[in-house]
Image (tube, helix red, strand yellow):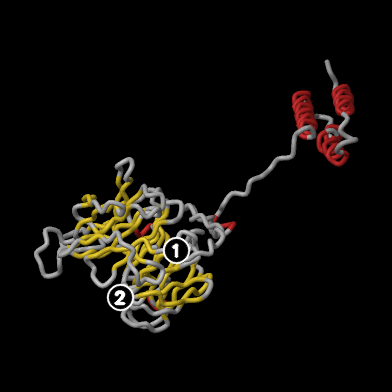
Amino acid sequence: MTTDGDLRERLAQLAESIDIDDRWPSIAAQTRTSMVRPLRRKRSVSPVVAIAAGIVLIVAATGLVLMSHRSPEVRTRTSNPSADGPPLQSSPQVPVGTLPADPGQPPTFLGMFRSSNSVLTRGSTDGLSPSGDAIDVSPEVITDFTVSRDGSTAYISVYPQPGTSRSTPLGRIERVDLRTGSRALVVADGNMPAISPDGRKLAYNTGREPGATNGILHVRDLVAGAERTWTGPVSQMSWSPDGRFLAFQGSSKSHGREVRVLDTEAAGASLAQARLLGPRSPLNGYWASPAFRADGRLSVVIFHGGGVDTAAHKEIDLIDPNSGEVLQTLSTANPGTQINLDWDASGHHLLIAGDNVVAYVADANGTRQVGRFNIARW
Protein backbone atom coordinates (compact mmCIF):
# COMPACT_ATOMS: atom_id res chain seq x y z
CA MET A 1 0.00 0.00 0.00
CA THR A 2 1.29 3.44 -0.92
CA THR A 3 2.00 5.65 2.09
CA ASP A 4 1.65 9.40 2.30
CA GLY A 5 5.39 9.69 2.40
CA ASP A 6 5.80 7.70 -0.81
CA LEU A 7 3.14 9.82 -2.54
CA ARG A 8 4.79 13.06 -1.50
CA GLU A 9 8.10 11.72 -2.77
CA ARG A 10 6.61 10.87 -6.20
CA LEU A 11 4.87 14.22 -6.52
CA ALA A 12 8.07 16.07 -5.77
CA GLN A 13 9.94 14.02 -8.36
CA LEU A 14 7.19 14.68 -10.92
CA ALA A 15 7.31 18.44 -10.36
CA GLU A 16 11.10 18.41 -10.76
CA SER A 17 10.85 16.44 -14.02
CA ILE A 18 8.51 19.06 -15.55
CA ASP A 19 11.23 21.68 -14.87
CA ILE A 20 9.10 24.81 -14.63
CA ASP A 21 11.51 26.58 -12.26
CA ASP A 22 13.71 27.97 -15.03
CA ARG A 23 10.79 29.38 -17.02
CA TRP A 24 8.34 30.45 -14.31
CA PRO A 25 10.04 30.37 -10.89
CA SER A 26 7.32 32.36 -9.13
CA ILE A 27 4.56 30.14 -10.49
CA ALA A 28 6.50 27.01 -9.55
CA ALA A 29 7.10 28.24 -6.04
CA GLN A 30 3.46 29.17 -5.57
CA THR A 31 2.34 25.84 -6.96
CA ARG A 32 4.54 23.86 -4.57
CA THR A 33 3.52 26.01 -1.64
CA SER A 34 -0.18 25.59 -2.30
CA MET A 35 -0.15 21.95 -3.39
CA VAL A 36 2.74 20.15 -1.72
CA ARG A 37 3.32 21.82 1.61
CA PRO A 38 -0.26 21.46 2.79
CA LEU A 39 0.16 17.75 2.31
CA ARG A 40 3.12 17.80 4.68
CA ARG A 41 1.12 19.64 7.34
CA LYS A 42 -1.92 17.44 7.05
CA ARG A 43 -0.84 13.89 7.59
CA SER A 44 -4.41 12.70 7.33
CA VAL A 45 -4.82 13.62 3.64
CA SER A 46 -6.19 10.62 1.79
CA PRO A 47 -4.47 9.11 -1.25
CA VAL A 48 -7.43 10.10 -3.44
CA VAL A 49 -7.06 13.78 -2.56
CA ALA A 50 -3.33 13.61 -3.08
CA ILE A 51 -3.71 12.00 -6.48
CA ALA A 52 -6.22 14.68 -7.50
CA ALA A 53 -3.80 17.38 -6.40
CA GLY A 54 -1.09 15.77 -8.49
CA ILE A 55 -3.31 15.72 -11.55
CA VAL A 56 -4.06 19.43 -11.07
CA LEU A 57 -0.36 20.16 -10.84
CA ILE A 58 0.37 18.22 -14.00
CA VAL A 59 -2.39 19.96 -15.96
CA ALA A 60 -1.31 23.40 -14.78
CA ALA A 61 2.31 22.80 -15.65
CA THR A 62 1.46 21.32 -19.04
CA GLY A 63 -0.73 24.34 -19.84
CA LEU A 64 2.12 26.70 -19.04
CA VAL A 65 4.45 24.80 -21.33
CA LEU A 66 1.96 24.90 -24.18
CA MET A 67 1.39 28.64 -23.70
CA SER A 68 5.08 29.29 -24.18
CA HIS A 69 4.84 27.95 -27.74
CA ARG A 70 1.73 29.88 -28.82
CA SER A 71 1.84 32.99 -30.99
CA PRO A 72 0.81 36.24 -29.29
CA GLU A 73 -2.94 36.74 -29.42
CA VAL A 74 -4.21 39.76 -31.37
CA ARG A 75 -7.19 41.24 -29.58
CA THR A 76 -9.78 43.18 -31.55
CA ARG A 77 -11.52 45.97 -29.72
CA THR A 78 -15.25 45.74 -30.21
CA SER A 79 -17.54 48.73 -30.38
CA ASN A 80 -19.39 49.10 -27.11
CA PRO A 81 -21.45 52.30 -27.01
CA SER A 82 -21.51 52.32 -23.21
CA ALA A 83 -17.79 51.74 -22.75
CA ASP A 84 -16.10 53.01 -25.92
CA GLY A 85 -18.37 55.90 -26.84
CA PRO A 86 -20.75 55.95 -29.81
CA PRO A 87 -20.22 53.23 -32.44
CA LEU A 88 -18.92 54.04 -35.91
CA GLN A 89 -21.50 55.24 -38.44
CA SER A 90 -23.01 52.09 -39.90
CA SER A 91 -24.24 53.62 -43.15
CA PRO A 92 -21.73 53.80 -46.02
CA GLN A 93 -19.93 57.09 -46.52
CA VAL A 94 -19.97 59.10 -49.71
CA PRO A 95 -16.55 58.66 -51.39
CA VAL A 96 -14.60 61.91 -51.31
CA GLY A 97 -11.44 62.37 -53.37
CA THR A 98 -9.43 65.09 -55.07
CA LEU A 99 -10.37 67.22 -58.05
CA PRO A 100 -8.79 66.51 -61.43
CA ALA A 101 -6.53 69.19 -62.84
CA ASP A 102 -8.25 72.28 -64.20
CA PRO A 103 -8.42 71.82 -67.99
CA GLY A 104 -7.91 75.55 -68.37
CA GLN A 105 -10.82 76.01 -70.76
CA PRO A 106 -14.27 77.29 -69.79
CA PRO A 107 -16.95 74.62 -70.29
CA THR A 108 -20.01 75.13 -72.46
CA PHE A 109 -23.60 74.79 -71.32
CA LEU A 110 -25.36 71.55 -72.19
CA GLY A 111 -28.77 73.15 -71.88
CA MET A 112 -30.62 76.20 -70.57
CA PHE A 113 -33.95 77.95 -70.32
CA ARG A 114 -33.75 81.33 -71.93
CA SER A 115 -36.55 83.84 -72.48
CA SER A 116 -39.22 81.15 -72.73
CA ASN A 117 -39.69 78.04 -70.65
CA SER A 118 -41.07 76.36 -73.75
CA VAL A 119 -37.63 76.11 -75.34
CA LEU A 120 -34.60 74.15 -74.13
CA THR A 121 -31.48 75.30 -75.95
CA ARG A 122 -27.73 75.19 -75.75
CA GLY A 123 -25.56 78.23 -75.23
CA SER A 124 -21.97 79.40 -75.06
CA THR A 125 -20.15 80.15 -71.82
CA ASP A 126 -21.30 83.76 -71.86
CA GLY A 127 -24.91 82.58 -71.82
CA LEU A 128 -25.86 84.92 -74.64
CA SER A 129 -25.30 83.02 -77.87
CA PRO A 130 -27.34 79.84 -78.40
CA SER A 131 -25.57 77.21 -80.45
CA GLY A 132 -28.58 75.35 -81.80
CA ASP A 133 -30.16 72.02 -80.82
CA ALA A 134 -33.24 73.85 -79.47
CA ILE A 135 -36.10 71.71 -78.17
CA ASP A 136 -39.42 73.55 -78.49
CA VAL A 137 -42.43 72.13 -76.64
CA SER A 138 -44.77 75.09 -77.24
CA PRO A 139 -47.47 75.71 -76.18
CA GLU A 140 -46.48 73.54 -73.22
CA VAL A 141 -43.70 74.48 -70.82
CA ILE A 142 -40.56 72.79 -69.50
CA THR A 143 -40.31 73.05 -65.72
CA ASP A 144 -37.02 71.24 -65.21
CA PHE A 145 -34.50 69.14 -67.08
CA THR A 146 -31.37 67.03 -66.68
CA VAL A 147 -28.65 66.30 -69.24
CA SER A 148 -26.35 63.29 -69.54
CA ARG A 149 -22.66 64.00 -69.01
CA ASP A 150 -21.83 63.29 -72.65
CA GLY A 151 -24.39 65.90 -73.74
CA SER A 152 -26.32 63.50 -75.97
CA THR A 153 -29.55 63.05 -74.00
CA ALA A 154 -31.85 65.25 -71.93
CA TYR A 155 -34.82 64.35 -69.73
CA ILE A 156 -37.39 67.13 -69.47
CA SER A 157 -40.43 67.77 -67.27
CA VAL A 158 -43.27 68.95 -69.52
CA TYR A 159 -46.44 70.67 -68.28
CA PRO A 160 -49.44 71.98 -70.18
CA GLN A 161 -49.48 75.73 -70.58
CA PRO A 162 -50.65 77.39 -67.34
CA GLY A 163 -54.40 77.99 -67.38
CA THR A 164 -55.18 75.00 -69.59
CA SER A 165 -56.73 71.74 -68.44
CA ARG A 166 -54.28 69.08 -67.31
CA SER A 167 -54.59 65.35 -67.81
CA THR A 168 -52.14 64.84 -64.92
CA PRO A 169 -51.35 67.02 -61.89
CA LEU A 170 -47.63 66.42 -62.23
CA GLY A 171 -46.87 66.63 -65.92
CA ARG A 172 -44.75 64.03 -67.70
CA ILE A 173 -41.08 63.21 -68.28
CA GLU A 174 -39.70 62.82 -71.80
CA ARG A 175 -36.32 61.68 -73.09
CA VAL A 176 -34.86 63.95 -75.77
CA ASP A 177 -32.07 63.00 -78.17
CA LEU A 178 -30.18 66.29 -78.40
CA ARG A 179 -28.50 65.19 -81.63
CA THR A 180 -31.68 64.48 -83.58
CA GLY A 181 -34.37 66.27 -81.55
CA SER A 182 -36.51 63.14 -81.25
CA ARG A 183 -38.64 62.79 -78.09
CA ALA A 184 -40.02 59.76 -76.26
CA LEU A 185 -42.26 59.40 -73.21
CA VAL A 186 -40.48 57.92 -70.16
CA VAL A 187 -42.80 58.71 -67.22
CA ALA A 188 -46.45 59.54 -67.77
CA ASP A 189 -46.96 61.14 -64.35
CA GLY A 190 -43.84 62.62 -62.79
CA ASN A 191 -41.46 65.57 -62.55
CA MET A 192 -37.99 66.78 -61.46
CA PRO A 193 -35.83 64.24 -63.35
CA ALA A 194 -32.16 63.72 -62.39
CA ILE A 195 -29.91 61.41 -64.42
CA SER A 196 -26.90 59.71 -62.79
CA PRO A 197 -23.41 60.49 -64.15
CA ASP A 198 -23.15 57.12 -65.89
CA GLY A 199 -26.60 57.55 -67.46
CA ARG A 200 -27.95 54.37 -65.88
CA LYS A 201 -30.28 55.66 -63.14
CA LEU A 202 -33.09 58.19 -63.41
CA ALA A 203 -34.50 59.76 -60.25
CA TYR A 204 -37.83 61.56 -60.35
CA ASN A 205 -40.90 62.46 -58.27
CA THR A 206 -44.55 61.56 -58.18
CA GLY A 207 -47.29 62.73 -55.82
CA ARG A 208 -49.07 60.71 -53.18
CA GLU A 209 -52.39 62.27 -54.14
CA PRO A 210 -53.71 64.51 -56.94
CA GLY A 211 -52.18 67.96 -56.68
CA ALA A 212 -49.25 66.88 -54.49
CA THR A 213 -45.85 67.27 -56.09
CA ASN A 214 -42.99 66.14 -53.87
CA GLY A 215 -44.42 63.02 -52.30
CA ILE A 216 -42.64 59.91 -53.63
CA LEU A 217 -39.09 59.56 -54.89
CA HIS A 218 -38.48 57.00 -57.64
CA VAL A 219 -35.11 55.66 -58.83
CA ARG A 220 -35.36 53.67 -62.05
CA ASP A 221 -32.55 51.53 -63.47
CA LEU A 222 -32.83 52.37 -67.15
CA VAL A 223 -30.82 49.28 -68.13
CA ALA A 224 -32.36 46.57 -65.94
CA GLY A 225 -35.79 48.17 -65.69
CA ALA A 226 -35.98 47.80 -61.89
CA GLU A 227 -37.37 50.65 -59.80
CA ARG A 228 -37.37 51.58 -56.10
CA THR A 229 -39.43 54.17 -54.25
CA TRP A 230 -39.10 56.19 -51.02
CA THR A 231 -41.80 58.25 -49.32
CA GLY A 232 -41.23 61.84 -48.26
CA PRO A 233 -40.94 65.33 -49.77
CA VAL A 234 -37.96 65.86 -52.07
CA SER A 235 -36.74 68.31 -54.72
CA GLN A 236 -33.47 69.66 -56.17
CA MET A 237 -31.76 66.30 -56.57
CA SER A 238 -28.11 65.66 -57.43
CA TRP A 239 -26.22 62.37 -57.93
CA SER A 240 -22.82 61.60 -56.40
CA PRO A 241 -20.01 60.93 -58.92
CA ASP A 242 -20.22 57.15 -58.31
CA GLY A 243 -23.98 57.09 -59.00
CA ARG A 244 -24.90 55.57 -55.62
CA PHE A 245 -25.86 58.51 -53.40
CA LEU A 246 -28.54 61.09 -54.06
CA ALA A 247 -28.47 64.50 -52.39
CA PHE A 248 -31.78 66.31 -52.22
CA GLN A 249 -33.63 69.20 -50.67
CA GLY A 250 -36.34 68.03 -48.32
CA SER A 251 -38.48 69.52 -45.61
CA SER A 252 -39.69 68.58 -42.15
CA LYS A 253 -41.49 70.20 -39.24
CA SER A 254 -38.45 69.82 -37.00
CA HIS A 255 -35.83 71.25 -39.41
CA GLY A 256 -37.70 73.25 -42.03
CA ARG A 257 -36.02 73.08 -45.43
CA GLU A 258 -33.11 70.69 -45.19
CA VAL A 259 -30.46 68.86 -47.21
CA ARG A 260 -30.11 65.09 -46.93
CA VAL A 261 -28.07 62.38 -48.66
CA LEU A 262 -29.74 59.06 -49.54
CA ASP A 263 -27.89 55.78 -50.12
CA THR A 264 -29.98 54.40 -52.99
CA GLU A 265 -28.59 50.88 -52.46
CA ALA A 266 -29.48 50.65 -48.75
CA ALA A 267 -32.58 48.98 -47.36
CA GLY A 268 -35.54 51.09 -46.31
CA ALA A 269 -38.35 53.01 -47.96
CA SER A 270 -38.50 56.31 -46.06
CA LEU A 271 -36.50 59.45 -46.83
CA ALA A 272 -36.38 60.12 -43.09
CA GLN A 273 -33.63 57.47 -43.01
CA ALA A 274 -31.40 59.55 -45.30
CA ARG A 275 -28.44 61.30 -43.67
CA LEU A 276 -29.37 64.81 -42.49
CA LEU A 277 -26.68 67.38 -43.27
CA GLY A 278 -28.43 70.59 -42.33
CA PRO A 279 -29.88 72.60 -40.90
CA ARG A 280 -29.87 71.00 -37.47
CA SER A 281 -32.66 73.25 -36.24
CA PRO A 282 -35.04 75.87 -37.72
CA LEU A 283 -32.96 78.58 -36.03
CA ASN A 284 -30.19 77.89 -38.55
CA GLY A 285 -32.29 79.17 -41.45
CA TYR A 286 -32.57 76.59 -44.22
CA TRP A 287 -30.40 74.68 -46.69
CA ALA A 288 -31.29 74.16 -50.34
CA SER A 289 -30.17 73.21 -53.86
CA PRO A 290 -27.43 70.60 -53.22
CA ALA A 291 -25.08 69.84 -56.12
CA PHE A 292 -22.31 67.22 -56.09
CA ARG A 293 -18.86 68.23 -57.32
CA ALA A 294 -16.51 65.87 -59.18
CA ASP A 295 -14.59 65.07 -55.98
CA GLY A 296 -17.73 64.03 -54.07
CA ARG A 297 -18.17 67.22 -52.04
CA LEU A 298 -21.42 69.17 -52.08
CA SER A 299 -22.31 72.78 -52.75
CA VAL A 300 -25.47 74.07 -51.06
CA VAL A 301 -27.33 77.35 -50.69
CA ILE A 302 -27.56 78.38 -47.04
CA PHE A 303 -29.96 81.02 -45.72
CA HIS A 304 -28.59 82.00 -42.30
CA GLY A 305 -31.56 84.14 -41.34
CA GLY A 306 -34.86 85.56 -42.47
CA GLY A 307 -37.59 83.77 -44.35
CA VAL A 308 -37.54 81.79 -47.56
CA ASP A 309 -38.20 84.88 -49.69
CA THR A 310 -35.42 87.02 -48.34
CA ALA A 311 -31.81 87.23 -49.42
CA ALA A 312 -30.52 88.12 -45.97
CA HIS A 313 -27.28 86.34 -45.09
CA LYS A 314 -27.45 84.05 -48.10
CA GLU A 315 -24.35 82.28 -49.38
CA ILE A 316 -23.29 79.24 -51.39
CA ASP A 317 -20.99 76.94 -49.43
CA LEU A 318 -19.00 73.79 -50.07
CA ILE A 319 -19.75 71.12 -47.45
CA ASP A 320 -18.66 67.63 -46.47
CA PRO A 321 -21.32 65.18 -47.79
CA ASN A 322 -21.04 62.93 -44.73
CA SER A 323 -20.89 65.35 -41.80
CA GLY A 324 -22.42 68.54 -43.22
CA GLU A 325 -19.35 70.53 -42.12
CA VAL A 326 -18.97 73.78 -44.06
CA LEU A 327 -15.58 73.69 -45.79
CA GLN A 328 -15.58 76.86 -47.88
CA THR A 329 -17.78 79.77 -48.96
CA LEU A 330 -17.95 79.73 -52.75
CA SER A 331 -20.17 82.71 -53.58
CA THR A 332 -22.50 85.32 -52.15
CA ALA A 333 -24.10 86.14 -55.53
CA ASN A 334 -27.84 86.69 -55.36
CA PRO A 335 -29.64 85.31 -58.43
CA GLY A 336 -32.95 85.10 -56.57
CA THR A 337 -34.69 82.89 -54.06
CA GLN A 338 -35.12 79.70 -56.11
CA ILE A 339 -31.48 78.97 -56.91
CA ASN A 340 -30.23 76.15 -59.12
CA LEU A 341 -26.62 74.96 -58.87
CA ASP A 342 -24.62 72.78 -61.26
CA TRP A 343 -20.93 71.84 -61.54
CA ASP A 344 -19.05 71.23 -64.75
CA ALA A 345 -17.36 67.86 -65.23
CA SER A 346 -13.98 69.08 -63.95
CA GLY A 347 -15.41 70.53 -60.73
CA HIS A 348 -13.72 73.88 -61.28
CA HIS A 349 -16.76 75.88 -62.44
CA LEU A 350 -20.02 76.29 -60.54
CA LEU A 351 -23.07 77.58 -62.38
CA ILE A 352 -25.52 79.64 -60.28
CA ALA A 353 -28.90 80.37 -61.86
CA GLY A 354 -32.02 81.68 -60.17
CA ASP A 355 -35.51 82.98 -60.63
CA ASN A 356 -34.47 86.55 -61.39
CA VAL A 357 -32.80 85.11 -64.56
CA VAL A 358 -29.37 86.49 -63.70
CA ALA A 359 -26.81 83.68 -63.86
CA TYR A 360 -23.27 83.55 -62.50
CA VAL A 361 -20.25 81.29 -62.67
CA ALA A 362 -18.02 80.86 -59.62
CA ASP A 363 -14.49 79.52 -60.03
CA ALA A 364 -10.95 80.25 -58.90
CA ASN A 365 -11.20 83.73 -60.42
CA GLY A 366 -14.25 84.68 -58.33
CA THR A 367 -17.88 85.07 -59.27
CA ARG A 368 -18.88 86.69 -62.56
CA GLN A 369 -22.18 87.22 -64.31
CA VAL A 370 -22.52 85.19 -67.51
CA GLY A 371 -26.03 85.77 -68.77
CA ARG A 372 -29.75 85.99 -68.12
CA PHE A 373 -31.61 82.68 -67.77
CA ASN A 374 -33.27 80.91 -64.91
CA ILE A 375 -32.09 77.30 -65.19
CA ALA A 376 -29.04 75.85 -66.92
CA ARG A 377 -26.84 72.74 -66.81
CA TRP A 378 -23.23 72.29 -67.71
Q: Label 1 amino acid?
A: Pro
Q: Quadrant of residue 288?
A: bottom left
How far across and how far down the image is residue 230, in percent? 30, 54
* Residue at x 38% of width, y 57% of height: 273
* Residue at x 20% of width, y 63% of height: 212
Tell me the quarter of the image containing the N terminus.
top right
Which residue is at the front of the view, 227 or 115? 115
* Residue at x 35% of width, y 77% of height: 358
Question: Which callout, 1 or 2, points to the residue nearer the camera?
Answer: 1
Res 217 label: none
How far across and how far down the image is residue 258, in percent? 37, 68
Farthest-out residue, top: 1
- On the picture, is 159 further left or further right than 341? left
- On the picture, is 303 further left or further right than 65? left
**Looking at the image, residue 139 lies above or below residue 75:** below
**Looking at the image, residue 163 lies above or below residue 4:** below
Tell me the quarter of the image containing the C terminus.
bottom left
Label 2 Cα neighbours within 10 Å, binned few <14 / some 14-19 / many ≥20:
some
**Looking at the image, residue 189 lies above or below residue 64:** below
How far across and how far down the image is residue 238, in percent? 38, 60
Where does label 1 land, which residue? 107
Which residue is at the front of the view, 343 or 300? 343
Label 1 Cα neighbours within 10 Å, binned few <14 / some 14-19 / many ≥20:
some
Q: Quadrant of residue 74?
A: top right
Which residue is at the front of the view, 363 or 205? 363
Where disc 1 sits, the SS reads: loop
Where does label 2 land, which residue? 355
